[in-house]
Structures are given as structure tokens and as C-alpha cells.
Image: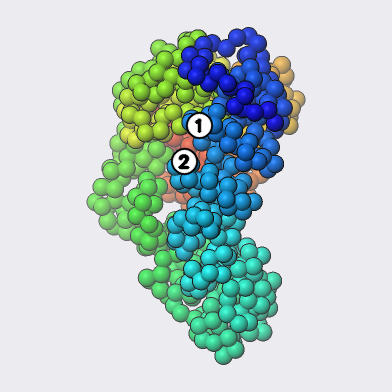
Amino acid sequence: MRSLRGLAAALFLVSVAAQAALSPQQEQALQNAAQSFSQGQYQAAAAALPLLANTYMGPWVAYWSLQPRLTTLTNAQFEQFAAEFPHGAAYRLLRRQWLLQLGKRQDWQNFAKVYRNGPAPQGIDLRCYAAMNPLLQVGSPAQLWSAAPAGSKACNQMAASALTQGRIPQALLWHKLAQMMVERDFRQASALAQFLPGAAAAAVQAIGQSGSAWLAANGSTATQVYGEQTGAELVHLALLRLTTSQPADAVAQAQTQPGLTSAQRASVYYAAGWRAARQLQSTEASAWFAKAVRTDPSYIAAPRMLHWMVRAALLQGNWSLVLAAVERLPKDEASASQWQFWKALALQQSGQNSQAQQIWARIASPFDAYGQLASAAIGSSLRLPPPESISAVFSSDPPETVSAANGVDADDLRRAFKLYQLGLYFDALWEWGQALDQRSPAAIRAAARQAAAHQAWLLTINASTHVANDEDWQQGYVLPYRNDILAAASNYGLAPSFVAGVIRQESGFAPGISSSAGAQGIMQVMPATANWVQQHYPQTASADLQEASGNIRIGTAYLAYLRRQFGDSPLLLAAAYNAGPGAVNHWLRKIPVGGSPWAGAIFAANIPYQQTRDYVLAVLSNAIVYRAILGEGAVSPLHYWKLS
């Protein structure tokens, strides 16, 4: 590899060079490098680096020349990069990725060197590597492992090392093995079981193969054979293993197996309820969740189980169970608008209307899906607060220069906008996020105005996530391609606000974006879907999927096709656009919502795909805001949550 230091010998001129516009030759080299990087190749970036090293895009070109070959990179190559570009977003991103790579290699000497030469990383995997590194041993292995997901390879490696050294108590090992059984990570459970005493390791391996077979052979005698405590732990693991395939059998056996604590029995009931709820078996799920609460009221299940406890209880109208679930959530989660909304509904249905009204009034908001529903619950009209208008720059041509935005570095902004222009949206968002981190609301608003001026709509929208309770909400609800949206929506009889809401969630109005699955453009249409639409909707035959207006025409035509199946339900249209009509029809058959005013919201809460649940919430809340912006007429938020 060429020396990055040699390529940037005139580093003292970088501050001057960074302010200069790129020459046509440099622009072409940059585009070639970006395109090559987007295809997982580094050669074009390496070739362009001598020409671009001392420009404001130098750090990213150097990053593109290294990142695709991360698995074969040497620490000397990373240090050359760090010496030339010791600051900025590209450096921070590559340092994070390189530390992960060094951790996977268990190259502890270089990991410690890179780790010490910068701020301590926050990711759980990196923190576990740092704790495992004998040259660092930063952090408590027990605390880290307790907080880590069951499937974290880095943290499980750390735990294995710490268990060998006696730095993790056996009680935590049993707890993590239980998590792995619930998550069906039987191989990892078997690997870590080697740190259990006596013959318990072989028992865990057998349990991973078949919990029911192990229970049939060993359940009644486990406490005599393995000892009271170890035997009970093994039976507990076997029952949790059984919940993954036969939850009803697991519940039945948990009631009769000897030696189990009330907490162990309750955890089996929670696991069975969680499994049943996710399979849309709300009757069984509610019964098992209620049994868990009765068995051990002090036992606190994992938040993800409590989330499904709320959902199953809503379908059954079991309001006391809804309240029990929300009360058991960690405080920071319980305060989120969705759980507060359902808590208020449960209180209202339980006759505590005054308390319900107080909660709904507190969370009511025009910008949050559950805040919008809370507004409907208290009969409050949704009114957008007066914005600080940035619409004057929405249609302006991108300026050739970028100035600092109230403390945000001009070159940071320039890099973010150039990355966006090149279609490297992840890199653009990373640079943007680093530039706005810990900036004042005024600085973020000023940066958002510049993003709008550069038509970097995804960055403009993202700026809102960096300011809590920002009154300048309009930066988050830009509406480019307005005429295209209005025309396409009119052609197919759809509300323009709904189409805009879909686009905002799908792409943030970034026309060149594509997903890992191959979805294309502003409405994220799969090429096969586009071909089908163009065959069945002749008016879209000439539409170009890769061009914003054509993509809008194709995507809107597909929404019109979905409406023929699901009627004028924005909720079902959004769900079908994300998950496909087959999935939505299946959910409609499986989710018994009843006829309450909240039936649609309860249906949406029970969608088994998290991505689709989140998508529906975002699209509907977006559409309600855009309805007000476009002046389509006031309607209750419940209009968007109807099922027919």
C-alpha cells in the first residue's frame, strides 16, 4: 500500500486546500472512488487518494481505500490513516470498525494501543473486548455480560475468559444460559455449560438437543442426581427449552416439577406467554402471563416479554394485566408514550377515567403516533405549532459554498452534503451526526437550513432527532417533490399526505437510496414490483424507477393496487406496503381486535414484525402531520387507524 503520509506531505496546507472547490478532475476521481466503494471495492479510492488527500474529502477517500479490506488490514496501515486524518467522522468510524476487527482477531496488543489513543467506545461488543483484553481489563465482566444480548459473540467470549478466571458468579451463568434457551441459542449454551460443576455440562448439551426428552428421563430425579440447586436449575433450563416448541407442555410440567422456586416457575410462564403472544395466540398468552404474575409477583421479566404481555392483554381486554405489565417495565421504558397510552386506556376501562385523562393530556402531541391517539382520546384537536419557516430554501439550487452554521464546522457540513450527493447516505448521516453532536438547538437549526438548501432532505429530517422538543418542527417535515406527489396521488385517488408519509419513512426523500434487499428510490420499490406495476398500470409504463418522479408514480400505483384489497384503511395500506398483502391478510385472520374505537391501534400493536409495527406508526403519524401541512381538512387521528 502507498504511504498515506507520503501522499499528504503538504499536510500543513490542508486548512487552505479544504476551502477550495474541487477541480473537474478531482470531482471525477471522487465520483469514481465513491461508486467503487459502494460496490465493496477499494482500488478506485486508493488510486484517487494522491489527488484528493489534501482536500476536504481526503479523510473519506482514505477511508474508502481501507474499509473494504478491513479483514486483511494491518495495524500499521490503520496508524498511517490515523496519522494523516486524526480527527473527524471518517476517523471515528474506521477506528470503531478497526477495534471490532482487532477484538475478533484477539490482537490484544494493537487493540489496547488503538483503544487508549482515543475516547472509550460505547458499544457493548467493544466494551466486552476491552474487559477481556488482558492489557486493559476495563469494566466489570459480570456487569457487562448481564447487560449484553444473549447472542453477543464478543461478550460471550469475554464471559468464557472471565469464567475461567472465576470473575463471574455461577448465578449469572445460570441466568445467561436461561436467556440462551429462550432465544434458541442452544449451541452457545452448550459451549458455556463447560463452566458448570460436575455432570451439569453434559446435561445442558442434552437439554439443548431436546428439553422434553431430558425432562422425561431426568425431570423427577434431577434434584437427587445433581443436587438440589443444580438439579432445579437444569429442570428450569429444560422447561425453557420446551417453551420454544411446546409452550403448553412446558407450562403444565412447570406446575408439577419438584424443587423449582416460584421465580423459576414464573419465568417459564413468561417465556411461554411470550412465545404464544408472538404467534398471535392471545388467549393462551394472556392466561400464562397472568399465571406468571400470580406465581411470583416480585419476579420481573425481560422488557420484551412485558411488551408482548401488554399486547396480548389488549386483545383479551384484560386491563389489570395491561397495568401489571406496564408497572413492571423499567422506568425509562414505562414512560414512553406507547406504554403510557395503553396504561391510560386500561385505567379508563377499569373505571379510573380521571387518571386516564391526565396521562393522555400529558402525552398528547401532534408529532408522535401515540401522542396523536392521546389527543383523540381527550377530544383535543391536532394543531401544529407555528414553525420557524425554512420553506424559503426548500426549492433553492444548492449553493457552491458552505458556511459554518453557528458553531458547526463548515468542512463537516460540506463533507456531509457531498457524501449525500454521491449517494453514500450512511456515510453522510454518520458525518452529519458527528457534526451536530452536542451542538445547540440554534446551531442544529442553522445546519438544517443549509441541508435544505443543498436538497439533502434526509439530513434535514434527521436534524430534528438531535433536538429535544424543538419548536422548529418543520425541518423534520420537508416536502420536496410536492407537485409529483400531488399529481400521482390525484391520479390514483389517494391522499397526498399519505403518499408523503410513506416517502418520509421509506427514504427521507433521498431519491437515490437503495436497500440491502434491492428496494430502489424514493418509495423503495423492488424492481420486480415495479415491473409488475408497469405491466398492469399502463400509465406508469414509461416511468423511470431510478428517477424521483417516476419512482413516485410507480410506488403510488402500487399503493392504489393495495387499496383494492384493503379499502381506505391507511393502517392496512401502510402495513401491506411494508410487509406485503399476504402477511396482512394472515394477521387480519389471526388478530381478534373487536369493534372498539381503538381496534386498529390494538391490531397494529400486535403485528408480529417489529419493523412493520414501527413502520406503521411512523407512516400514520407522518401522514397526519402532512395532512395539516397540505390543508386537506381536519379529521380525527382515529381515521388513520381504522381497519376498513
Q: Which residue is mark 2?
A: 118
Residue drawn where x is 28% and y is 42% of the image: 361
Colouring: rainbow
Looking at the picture, how far across and down is residue 527, in whole percent? 71, 29
Residue drawn where x is 48% and y is 41% of the image: 117
Residue drawn where x is 44% and y is 42% of the image: 119
Q: Nearer the viewer, residue 531 or 406?
A: 406
Q: Nearer the viewer, residue 310 or 448?
A: 448
Quarter of the rendering occupied by the N terminus: top right
Figure quadrant of residue 581: top right
Q: Amino acid at mark 1?
A: Pro
- Upstream in sequence: badge 1 or badge 2: 1
Q: Which residue is mark 1?
A: 86
| Helix, strand or loop status at disc 1 | loop
Mark 1–mark 2 distance (CA, rounded to whole Å): 10 Å
Relative to 448, 237 lies left or right: right
Q: Bin the neighbour count of mark 1 within 10 Å (Cα to Cα): few under 14, some 14-19, many 20 and up.
A: some
The reply to whether residue 558 is visible in this rendering is no
Residue drawn where x is 60% and y is 19% of the image: 52
Q: Amino acid at mark 2?
A: Gly
Relative to 206, 165 lies left or right: left
| Helix, strand or loop status at disc 2 | loop
Disc 1 and disc 2 in contact, CB within 8 angstroms: no
The reply to whether residue 263 is visible in this rendering is yes
Looking at the picture, how far across and down is residue 477, in whole percent? 43, 25
